[in-house]
Image: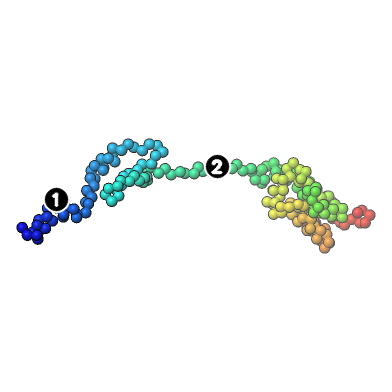
Amino acid sequence: MDAHAAAKDSASDDTGLFRKLQPNRVPPVDREALLKVNQDKPAAQDGEQETEEISIAGRTKMHVPKPKSSAAVVEQKEEPKKEEEKEPEPEDDPEIRDELNGILKMSPIIVFSKSYCPYSAKAKNILLEKYNIVPAPFVVELDLHPLGQKLQLLLARNTGRKTVPNILVNGRSIGGGDDIAALDQEQQLGAKLKLYGGKRIMEVTPKTAKEA
């Protein structure tokens, strides 16, 4: 046998050079065996996350977390917030309405004031000291009244004026301290009071120097 034939026979022989030059072949994955291993694994305990094996390059097996099924996800719903119990509005409180109606009957002119308020003091000084008004204006000091805060809220809703003083003539607000001072300066206060007071106001005249 010549050298060429010997080399050919050696390359075709499984024990020869040809076998040594073949790359390492990776054996095929036995899917049935892998499935059986996964089925035989114990179920994950509470608090543990299930894992599954995946094959990397056909040889290395790696455990990765199993995706949670949508059925296992529990939606957390927020509990509806309880509505806070609200106090009744002043106009819905019969005690406050009755108190205000009772005050309005005291005189056609009501001065809702606060004892420490300088604007209230200015309005009271003009109405009580500079004019003879019959019947005399009735003054309510809201800071001293047991229902003063609620009365002020009700007045704000009914007249649109939240602050004091709030001067009402026949239940209609004609303004506060600055408004009364402006009407007095323009010599329009008496006419305004008579216009709003109607027959309930019998007299509105400036006091003389002796009376003042």
Q: Nearer the viewer, residue 148 or 71?
A: 71
Quarter of image, res 160: bottom right
Q: Residue at x 76, y 46 (%)?
A: 142
**Quarter that holds the C terminus:** bottom right
What's under tag 1, amino acid-wise? Answer: Thr
Q: Residue at x 66, y 46 (%)?
A: 91
Mark 1 lies on residue: 15
Q: Residue at x 87, y 57 (%)?
A: 206
| Disc 2 packing (10 Å; few <14; some 14–19; many ≥20) | few
Mark 2 lies on residue: 82
Q: Secondary structure at mark 1?
A: loop
**Which mark is drawn over residue 37?**
none
Residue 95 placement, left or right of 203: left
Q: Residue at x 45, y 43 (%)?
A: 76
**Does residue 107 appear anywhere in the picture?**
no
Disc 2 to disc 1, C-alpha distance? 85 Å
**Quarter that holds the N terminus:** bottom left
Whether 184 is drawn above or below 34: the answer is: below
Q: Secondary structure at mark 2?
A: loop
Quarter of image, res 40: top left
Q: Nearer the viewer, residue 6 or 110?
A: 6
Q: Could you tell me residue 181's position as x and y percent? A: 81, 58
Residue 176 placement, left or right of 42: right
**Does residue 150 appear anywhere in the picture?**
yes
The answer to the question of whether label 2 and label 1 lie on touching residues, with beta carbons closer than 8 A, is no
